Image: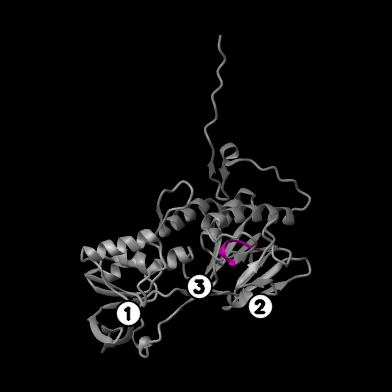
Amino acid sequence: MIETDILIIGAGPTGLFTVFEAGLLKLKCHLIDALPQSGGQCTEIYPKKPIYDIPGFPEVLAGDLVKNLMRQIEPFQPGFTLGERADTIEKLDDGSFIVTTEKGTKHHAPIVAIAGGLGSFEPRKPPITNLSNFEDKGVEYIIRDPELYRDKNVVISGGGDSALDWSIFLTDVAKSVTLIHRRNEFRGALDSVEKVQELKNLGKIELITPAEVVGLVGTNKLEEVVIKRGAEVFNRECDHFIPLFGLSPKLGPIADWGLEIEKNAIKVDNSLDYQTNIPGIYAIGDVNTYPGKLKLILCGFHEATLMCQSAYQRIFPDKRYVMKYTTVGGVEGFDGSKKEAPKAIVKSID
């Protein structure tokens, strides 16, 4: 049985930052994540994608943000159960919880913080008859390592930000990039649409609209895609076909824990501490919903901070916590490390 003060379900940015805020309160954390590594979507889906709205970072790659968070929480020595999905929860008579993964690993804690992002994801797949025959043989639904496409012929389908952004990015990596969308209009950011148009004019992206990929050709691996544009049907040489039609989020087993759910998200009390309808269980980050909710990483950081204050009071109802700024109190890790600002030198003047 793994014992901890706060059991965090989800090791994405919000879950990781929770470890830091809890550590300042001397609370120990353990994280569960179905993915084999920490970082959530930032690691699994877009590690090389820049993020522009993290305070203090004009631009940071998603993967680098996760590395920085891991460095930040290292002094607080969190535990990890990775590659296992939180499956069941049991509330004990003393109000604490036992969470068991699908592999049977049991975790005991007085506080459970669900920071599972949007839940688990399944790609939305195009209706191509032999699509599954080429999965991992030239068909990918998520770009994890751009170097896989170095000097290859890449065809991307989609009309949102991911399709536009990756088409732009891969022009400096792939031998050729073809972007196909079933409409002439795109749903992505205007500057991305303009950039794609500019790259098309420079001959760096082939843009085919309105059209769609209707077939795949190859023996042991993908060799060509079949494209339909109006009444015209033609083939295009292709090493990798990447349909980016979005991901369908699913809460998974958490949806059966008795929590109040609204539109595939967990309802919380945002007036105080992001607690769910079950005392002792909180939901923070993209997994929760409340009036005015914004699904931003920086909002998840804020929610994690307030949640930890509430968790401390729940664990130690008779203790009064006096908040100290890290600029004053520093950061004292569980590993014996201590970070603090230099003390001012006071000199008397004769």
Q: Earlier in the sequence, mark 3 or mark 2?
A: 3
Q: Earlier in the sequence, mark 2 or mark 1?
A: 1
The tag on residue 256 is 2
Please tell me whether residue 235 is drawn above or below residue 205 in the rendered image. Answer: below
Mark 3 to mark 2 CA distance (whole Å): 21 Å
State the residue at coordinates (60%, 39%).
329
State the residue at coordinates (37%, 61%).
48
Q: Please report the bounds of the magenta region as a residue range.
A: 283-287
Q: Which is the main secondary structure of the residues drawn in magenta?
A: helix
Rendered image quadrant of residue 102: bottom right
Mark 3 crowd level (few <14, some 14–19, many ≥20, 10 Å Cα): some
Q: In the structure shown, which secondary structural element does the residue marked by tag 3 occupy?
A: loop
Determine which residue is flagged by label 1.
211
Looking at the rendered image, the quarter that the N terminus falls into is: bottom right
Determine which residue is flagged by label 3.
83
Asked if labels 1 and 2 touch by Cβ distance under 8 angstroms, the answer is no
**Looking at the picture, how far across and down is residue 15, in whole percent?**
56, 60
